[in-house]
Amino acid sequence: MVDKIVVEKEAPEEKTEETKSGEIKPKEKKKLSKKGIIAIIVAIVVIAAAVIAYYVLTTDSRNYNSAKELFKEEKFQEALEMFTELGDYEDSAEMVEKCEYELSVDGQFMRSLSKGLMARWAESDAQAEQGFIGEDPDLYSKYCEIELEQVKDFANQTFDNSELEADAKQYIEYLNQAQEATKFYTVDYATFSTQWADIYANRTILLKKFVDDYGLVVKEEYQDTLDDLLVDASAAQEQIDIKESIQKMTEQFKIETTEDEWGYKTYKISMKNTTDRTFEYFSAEINLYDKNQVIVGTGNTDQLSSWQPGQEASVNAWFDGEINPNDYTIEYVPHYQSGTYYS
């Protein structure tokens, strides 16, 4: 039988210290002071606060990024709720206003306008890729319809911005007018061409206003197309401005009647170039209206050349039949060339 071997463990050596008398006694444990305890508590609180702050900040960051993504996906109501909860974190307050705008009729229209334009241009590009680059009344009508599908419902809605409301409804009306003009394409091309060109000019001018005043934007791949329209809008606006200035000028024209000894009458038009343009040539057709606004006579003037701003002139006028133009209301329909502008 094997004897059990018992190994006794030595007790841990107590820490001791020697007294002055030479006696050895256990070393006393140091106690924490009140200040030390307070320091430890403060450190714990600071660390806890830092942990909480980090958690809050990272949570806010995650929520902010999620809200941004919702905004990008046009889930504006959900994004609004998240940005509102974020308070003044980053630009959340500004994003709240953006969400509210996008949810308004104003914001919905501007977004729909952008989508309608891009869809129209996408269809136009697709037709061009297939080789359909010539004029086609059905395609013109289709382009208008593509835009109308996006914006036509706003014709009966109330906007926050009354000026935007008027412009939006006018733009919708231009689309309707353009679509209606395509009906003249095969039966009266001159009428179609005139109406389509006038509507296009007014439409591009209004699109420029949507960009400048209301922040219309499109995706990057369509920016060049929009930029081209804005160039056309500037040219169209300049042409409209000169037509208005010429209209004001013709309202100041005066007709003079001279009768010789045999009763033969001749007519002259006294006029002054009150615009800031030099006309390479200028003449006018004359319509005479009775009190019921019915045209009862017509005429025309001789042509001026190199008519300078501020220059006065007197030209002969000719009428059909024996009509005294002084008895009627007169309308002048100008024909001119000024730089690159013709009428």
Image (cartoon, helix red, strand yellow):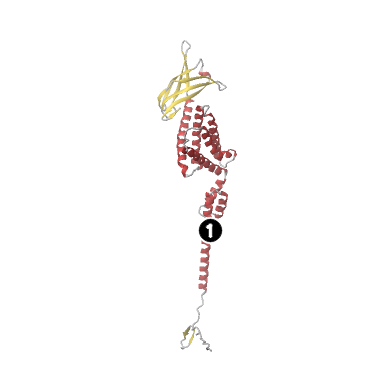
Q: Quadrant of residue 276?
A: top left
What residue did someone put label 1 on? 59
Q: Position of residue 223 (x, y in %)?
A: 46, 42
Q: Position of residue 322 (x, y in %)?
A: 51, 15
Specify whether residue 102 is in view: yes
Q: Residue 119 versus residue 109: which sits nearer the camera?
A: 119
**Is 259 drawn above or below residue 253 in the view shown?**
above
Q: Position of residue 278 (x, y in %)?
A: 41, 28
Specify whether residue 88 is in view: no
Q: Residue 186 versus residue 110: which sits nearer the camera?
A: 186
Residue found 56% across the figure and 49% down from its top: 76
Residue at the top extreme of this rendering? 262
Residue found 53% across the figure and 61% down from its top: 55
Q: Position of residue 285 (x, y in %)?
A: 48, 22
Q: Residue 208 versus residue 257: which sits nearer the camera?
A: 208
Left-right relation of 245 to 77? left
